[in-house]
Image (cartoon, rainbow, N blue to C red):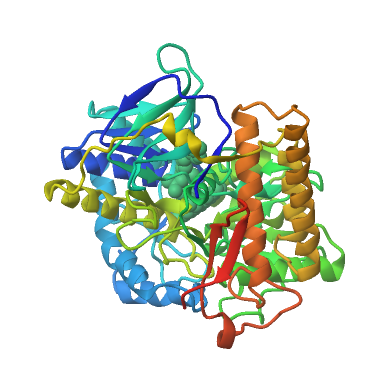
Amino acid sequence: MSYRLTAPVPGWTTTTDVVVVGSGVAGLTVALNVRKAGLRAMVVTKAMLDDGSTRWAQGGIAAALGDGDTPEQHLDDTLVAGAGLCDEEAVRTLVTEGPDAVHRLIGTGAAFDQDADGAILLTREGGHHRRRIAHAGGDATGAEISRALVAAVRSDPGIELIEHALVLDLLTDADGRAAGLTLHVMGEGQRDGVGAIRARAVVLATGGMGQVFSATTNPAVSTGDGVALALRAGAEVTDLEFVQFHPTVLWLGPDAEGQQPLVSEAVRGEGAYLVDGAGVRFMAGQHELAELAPRDIVAKAITRQMQLQGAEHMYLDGRHFGAEMWEQRFPTILASCRSHGIDPVTGLIPVAPAAHYASGGVRTDLTGRTTVPGLYACGEVACTGVHGANRLASNSLLEGLVFAERIAADLAERHRAGDLPERSVDVAAARSARTAPLLAPETRAEIQRLMSRGAGVLRSAASMAATAEGLAALGREAGTHLDEGKPADPRVETWEAANLHLVATALVAAAVLREETRGCHWREDFPERDDAHWLRHVVTVLGSDGAPEASAGRP
Ligand SMILES: Cc1cc2nc3c(=O)[nH]c(=O)nc-3n(C[C@H](O)[C@H](O)[C@H](O)COP(=O)(O)OP(=O)(O)OC[C@H]3O[C@@H](n4cnc5c(N)ncnc54)[C@H](O)[C@@H]3O)c2cc1C
């Protein structure tokens, strides 16, 4: 049984070959590549084309591009970070196809930083034993990738772009295959309000879900819509409990909420170190890589120090870089710190962990196919198996690139083989799917508070029970308003709140089930890694009552 968001009947319909939801590195790469196969593409995106996480990426993109580096070494580092849960075949695919994919991205127009001889400059980040992170504009890698991809899609007349369009739900044909989607366009003219797009295939590239937490590095659009849509459509999602908290997010005060400025790991890669309020370094002795240990280790160490010392944050010390290096290598971070009254050239940077990256997501195979026929997913919304229990720094842009290309190749192959027919879908009949009540816009902040309080860096059965109960109460309240004939009206804020609520509930269900500490999932009540029971993935689907059901799945 599939579900859908409460929404008006679509007032308009249009058709394309492949509809791509999202315009970050993953979505735009799919669109550009399906065009090469002669298919029409339509990119639908919630805000402006460059409004996802891609634009915010600072550190860079990881690939074995340097002298002496090999995909095998990149694979080893990725598997270590993933703490036993990576799909080795997926990682091998990523690291072997990665270097060429980066060169193709350069061919599309992305300009990476180079030395005087034109060789790509490479830096190091946590968990990498080699310098293998290509960067652009110093610390503005994502902005450059986004700029290049946006320019490329804008110059291709075969790619139709629909901005300010919130995708609501999947449409399926009589055989249960993806046949398009419903969406709400905030615009004027023919395509205004709720409509439908018919397509031969649907690709989700909706990015992350950081907005389920109070403090996150993710932009406002990262509300987990793709995972919520996939769940409602009957797809399996996996590894939702593995949320990476970035260790060094600029601390802006106890009440700061929403997107927070990131201080990239590359700052530590270039030699900045972590100190407590008394100026004492605390990472040495915790891991052989000290400040460059994998992110979960650093985030836990910071959180532990904060707890021990009753402090709200720790500090990053990069004063020894000097003004010139800050200005040239980290201009974005320098400007961001200074705009908040902090000067890293002369002072310490206050930092604390914040939600950063969803390692889990909609389960896919190596061609990006989800468990719903015709529905694909790539980028942060997907769980390809590459990240396991924890993403290795700068592997995510690469994953978006590599698996987007693989989806396009799969679609091209199916098209050639005549296996990508037009799908017929009765948009009105699709409305027979069951609906869940929408949530009031104010619940967004309440969901975020509940999640940060009970299901953040530190988790236990007790803390998550409180969060689960709080989330259930919000759901019951929405049901009561519906019964009383006063439901929340369908609009962007209520659809997003419903998505956040569903994703948060699914995340907590998965995190409760995994009774161990692994990767970025840290259970205070189960502090050890437990390979005997938990060398397996948690799979979540919607149950018959519309609530997420998590179960221990495949190893
Ligand atoms: C501050 C920051 C720094 C980072 N630094 C790095 C780094 O250095 N290296 C690295 O590899 N990774 C980094 N990451 C992670 C990386 O940027 C992301 O994982 C990656 O960009 C995700 O790309 P994507 O295409 O999957 O999604 P995004 O770029 O997030 O794009 C998602 C798109 O989907 C759209 N969308 C969402 N929901 C809907 C909907 N319902 N309807 C229509 N459209 C929708 C959004 O508007 C957006 O266009 C960083 C992330 C952040 C936030």
Say if 184 sits above or below 102 in the image: above
Residue at horizontal 25%, vertical 53%?
103
The location of residue 132, given as percent across then percent down, is 38, 64
Front in this rendered view, residue 530 or 337: 530
Quarter of image, res 162 = top left
**Residue furthest top as drawn:** 189
Residue at horizontal 72%, vertical 47%?
448
In-image side of 356 versus 350 (left or right): left
Front in this rendered view, residue 504 or 426: 426
Front in this rendered view, residue 158 or 177: 177
Residue 38 appears in the figure: yes
Residue 262 appears in the figure: no
In-image side of 505 versus 186 (left or right): right
The location of residue 44, given as percent across then percent down, is 40, 32
Picture mark count: 0
Front in this rendered view, residue 291 or 103: 103
Residue at horizontal 38%, vertical 56%?
370
The location of residue 209, given as percent across then percent down, is 57, 49
**Residue furthest right as drawn:** 310
Quarter of image, res 283 = bottom right
Say if 267 sits above or below 473 in the image: below
The location of residue 438, given as percent across then percent down, is 66, 36
Quarter of image, res 480 = top right
Say if 446 sits above or below 292 in the image: above
